[in-house]
Image (cartoon, rainbow, N blue to C red):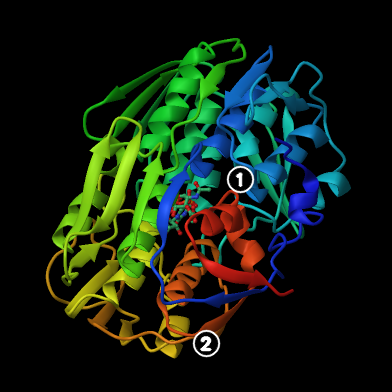
């Protein structure tokens, strides 16, 4: 495998975004796809490699452009990155970490959200850090206030510059008591990556507990960190003076697994997702079953298909162990094929239904309520952010000319085009490569009928 910067086309905001597909839909997707390491763990574990004194090996790394961006940022800081002894493995040698020039780092401005996680490790290694403006999907404001507040509690001095932020830690970093206003995935990772080498103990309350975070804790423990996970979203980290490298096989990508499952339901196909594991997908599998989707749990993966006519369902996105916000977009395509009214309450991001415009253009009947539906309490009430989508099915979808807006919305556009009768032109396909490895090859393996036309 080669993970190269070419995949990011120079670190542009939407890597390789311009690719266009002509998709002829209306036939089931069937066959086998395999999912590798989770994008949302792999990129963080790569940052963790910076904290070690010795070489780290990460296995099952997907060839996606987010990985290429993080690889390049590690290299800019003097980490030597090479392919390992098996396909999909990366070897990261941090023994010559050095300060990078601001211009070199700035080349990656707008390319990903992961650079914000370099703060703690760079402060430990170099005493300073420059973080470029962040990228990632445009699905809401995506502020970094929780990150910066936490870093300040550790003793970091944060200076906002026109093109990013500069951090220093004149007194070193010290353990802190941090209570997150919301169980943010990124802010929890920020605290973990900073606390493991801060002096003293850090107590983090209201932490995110996604399986990818538990896997990151596993990586850090292999490196020599002391981290205990306590009841009620509390994580306690005892800082240590030195960490070593790790050898770790990344947890599978449950978001990609759920995406292929939704594709099977939407197109009335049968897809075996090799590498998917039941335990990390229990909430998703319940939604599939309520929709009259069927699944067969096997030792090496999960087979997804319909169990008969699809039924409507109501889901509410939430932090783990709730229904992930990244699952709703592909599943909404399947909901357009269920007879009756489905509802999706989005409570994590404030702007994550933009992709439904294209589905409506293709014949779906989806009404977005930008301020949510006031119909009962949510598990984590965030009324100021909440929106709802009401999907009335079953609607026949037809081909259309559509533009991919973001990663998960874009994947759902492709699945909608494959569900629709007739030909669709889907633009900006490259955005989907940020998180879906070998997308076109996998679609071909599943019998999709398409051409790359631009
Ligand atoms: N938030 C703040 N302030 C902060 C940080 C977060 O207000 O400082 C808010 C966000 O605006 C959002 C909520 O908290 O409303 C949750 O954000 P979180 O920090 O949990 O998300 P993230 O770390 O930026 C990761 C994934 C997302 C995934 C979310 C939720 C990565 C690189 N990204 O984002 O994945 O949706 O957690 O699970 O891990 C994707 O894969 O397509 C994707 C967007």
Tag on residue 34? none
Q: Are marks 1 and 2 in contact (CB under 8 Å)?
A: no
Q: How far from the left and from the top, in percent, is residue 224?
A: 51, 10
The residue to which callout 2 is attached is: 400
Q: Earlier in the sequence, mark 1 or mark 2?
A: 1
**238 or 184, which is in the foreground?**
184
Q: How far from the left and from the top, in percent, is residue 402?
A: 56, 82
Q: Tag 1's secondary structure? A: helix
Q: How far from the left and from the top, in percent, is residue 27?
A: 41, 72
Classify the position of the N terminus by image quarter.
top right
**Residue at 54 percent of width and 29 percent of height:** 193
- How far, Cα to Cα, is label 1 from label 2? 34 Å
* Residue at the farthest left position: 376
Classify the position of the C terminus by image quarter.
bottom right
Q: Report which quarter residue 306 is drawn in.
A: bottom left
Quick check: is the Cβ at mark 1 less than 8 Å away from ligand 1? yes
**Residue at 47 percent of width and 42 percent of height:** 34
The residue to which callout 1 is attached is: 114
Quick check: can you spot residue 143?
A: no
Q: Tag 2's secondary structure? A: loop
Q: How far from the left and from the top, in percent, is residue 413?
A: 48, 73
Q: Report which quarter residue 372 is drawn in.
A: bottom left
**127 or 185, which is in the foreground?**
185
**Residue at 53 percent of width and 43 percent of height:** 39
């Amino acid at each position: 495998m080669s993970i190269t910067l070419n995949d990011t086309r120079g670190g542009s905001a939407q890597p390789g975004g311009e690719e266009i597909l002509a998709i002829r839909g209306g036939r089931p997707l069937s066959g086998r796809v395999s999912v590798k390491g989770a994008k949302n763990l792999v990129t963080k574990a790569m940052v963790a490699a910076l904290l070690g004194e010795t070489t780290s090996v990460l296995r099952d790394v997907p060839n996606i452009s987010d990985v290429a961006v993080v690889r390049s940022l590690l290299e800019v800081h003097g980490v030597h990155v090479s392919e390992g002894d098996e396909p999909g493995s990366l070897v990261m040698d941090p023994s010559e970490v050095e300060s990078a020039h601001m211009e070199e780092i700035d080349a990656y401005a707008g390319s990903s959200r992961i650079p914000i996680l370099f703060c703690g490790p760079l402060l430990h290694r170099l005493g300073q850090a420059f973080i470029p403006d962040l990228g990632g999907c445009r699905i809401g404001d995506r502020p970094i206030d929780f990150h910066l507040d936490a870093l300040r509690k550790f003793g970091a001095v944060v200076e906002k510059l026109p093109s990013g932020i500069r951090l220093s830690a004149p007194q070193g970093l010290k353990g802190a008591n941090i209570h997150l206003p919301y169980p943010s995935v990124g802010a929890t990772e920020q605290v973990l990556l900073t606390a493991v080498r801060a002096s003293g103990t850090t107590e983090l309350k209201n932490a995110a507990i996604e399986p990818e975070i538990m896997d990151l804790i596993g990586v850090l423990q292999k490196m020599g960190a002391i981290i205990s996970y306590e009841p009620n979203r509390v994580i306690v980290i005892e800082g240590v003076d030195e960490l070593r490298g790790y050898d770790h096989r990344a947890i599978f990508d449950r978001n990609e697994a759920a995406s292929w499952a939704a594709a099977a339901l939407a197109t009335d196909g049968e897809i075996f997702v090799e590498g998917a594991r039941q335990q990390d997908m229990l909430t998703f599998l319940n939604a599939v079953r309520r929709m009259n989707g069927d699944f067969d749990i096997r030792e090496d993966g999960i087979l997804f298909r319909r169990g008969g006519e699809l039924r409507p369902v109501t889901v509410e996105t939430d932090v783990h162990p709730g229904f992930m916000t990244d699952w709703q977009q592909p599943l909404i395509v399947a909901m357009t094929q269920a007879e009756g009214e489905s509802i999706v309450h989005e409570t994590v991001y404030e702007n994550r239904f933009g992709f439904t415009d294209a589905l409506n253009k293709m014949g779906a009947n989806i009404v977005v309520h930008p301020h949510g539906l006031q119909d009962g309490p949510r598990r984590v009430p965030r009324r100021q952010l909440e929106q709802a989508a009401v999907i009335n099915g079953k609607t026949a979808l037809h081909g259309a000319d559509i533009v991919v807006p973001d990663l998960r919305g874009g994947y759902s556009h492709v699945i909608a085009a494959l569900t629709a009768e007739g030909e669709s032109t889907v633009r900006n396909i490259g955005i989907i490569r940020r998180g879906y490895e070998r997308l076109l090859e996998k679609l071909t393996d599943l019998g999709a009928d398409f051409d790359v036309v631009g």
